[in-house]
Amino acid sequence: MAKAGERVPGRRWLIGCLLGVGILVNYIDRVGLSAATPALSTELGLTATDIGLLGSAFFWTYSLLQIPGGMALDRFGVTAVGRASAFLWAVASAITALASGLYGIVAARMLLGVAEAPAFPASQKATGHWFPIDERARSTAIFDSAAKFSNVFGVPLVAFVIFLYGWRWGFGITAILSLAYFIAYYIIYRNPSEDPNLSRSEHAYIIAGGGTPEGPAPAGQSRMLGYLLGRRKVWGLTIGFSAYGYTFYLFLTWLPGYLAQTMHMNLMSAAGYSTIPWIFATLADLLIGGFLVDHLIARGYDSTRVRQMVIIVGGLMGLAVIGAAFTVRPGWALLWLSISISGLSATSPVGSSIVSLIAPKGGTGTVGGILNFTNNMMGALAPIVTGIVVDWTQSFAGAFLIAGVVLVVGIFFYVVVLGRIEPIADLAEEVPEAVVAVP
């Protein structure tokens, strides 16, 4: 372990940045569809309900494979599963660019969901392995904020490519980025125990600070899944985080379309203005959900209360989405949306970091899989519900009001059902004494 005053090497931060780049590319694959929506609607004659179906297609397979993907991570490790996932999503991105017709694109997006399913739980599990507890919020915020920054960088990039070369090349650029990331991940990423470039002092620092132990669950992944599904903390975290996910994915899939329809903007204008809320979201994610949380906990404030306060305040800020339901002025709409997305983004790394903070030994990937399954089912549900409401009412007001109600439910589960943020007992410790064999 590093001595007092001794500088600890920073290999872990390179790994954290690598994970952030992965999630950035991962989400550019997703948000590329929202940038392509106006062009696809015109060329294929799609209704708002069709666009909602297309927006949700990725999330059906992505969501259904979250728990199996998390279990695979706990069984085979981040290195092997992460490599396979990154390669497959590069292939799936290329197939999306070659697909044609509504149902061809839907099938390609479902394949992309299969490929990318392990990406987020892999980052959650890797962060647990690579970072001590008092750096967990910052390290989680690196990859979590990349999901928001994808809208700042990805939407304009894809929109510009579509503007010049058509929607197929909009998806083609994401395939190129995905292949580049696979190569980088293959070369750089290893678990701490496997990494020859990780110094002994930094490895000791991570372990002494509460880094999540490597290795599978002692009792196996199937028993671990059943055990975790019966834990109240898992459901408090899962439903609370999923409420955030509903509104996040509403914005992720519909924000350019909302600006184009309600504010009567063209593709480039809608894509450009949609980056404004996401810039604030990225900053809130990093500075509040990441650095501020770690800073306050390091100063001696109770870790559970710090995280709960960020979740409550951020969730209440998220209710500003209701304000956007009652305006047709671009300035006011962007103000309300910026407040809402920023508040929710501040809660996101807090919720994501709780995965490794409450998971028992060998269960981080499975907890992450459960959380990401329900969260991404919201990614499947929110685009469809929004599309149906918009077709029915010719307005986004009802869709935004529904998001507000979901957020109130989420705050309740985060604070009341999750309770104190502390590790769930290891599975082996829960075996009743009556069934233990007496020698």
Image (spheres, rainbow, N blue to C red):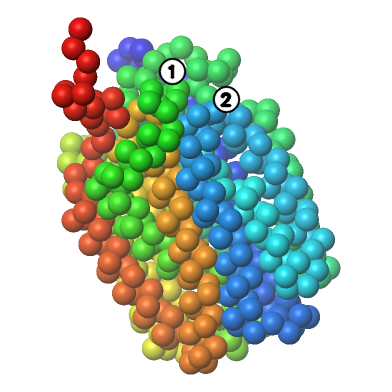
Residue 295 x/y as whole percent: 29, 41
Tell me if I can see residue 364 in this picture.
no
Q: On residue 69, which mark appears?
A: none
Kind of residue at disc 1: His
Q: On residue 190, which mark appears?
A: 2
Q: The C terminus lies in which quarter of the figure? A: top left
Of residues 267 and 242, the one drawn nearer to the viewer in this rendering:
242
* Disc nearer the start of the sequence (1/2): 2
Among the 4 quarters of the image, the one containing residue 81:
top right
In the orientation shown, which residue stands out farthest toward the top?
Answer: 439
Of residues 66 and 165, the one drawn nearer to the viewer in this rendering:
66
Q: The N terminus lies in which quarter of the figure? A: top left
- Is 285 placed above or below 253 here? above
- Is 436 placed above or below 297 here? above
Q: Secondary structure at mark 1?
A: helix
Q: On residue 203, which mark appears?
A: 1
Tell me if I can see residue 421 in this picture.
yes
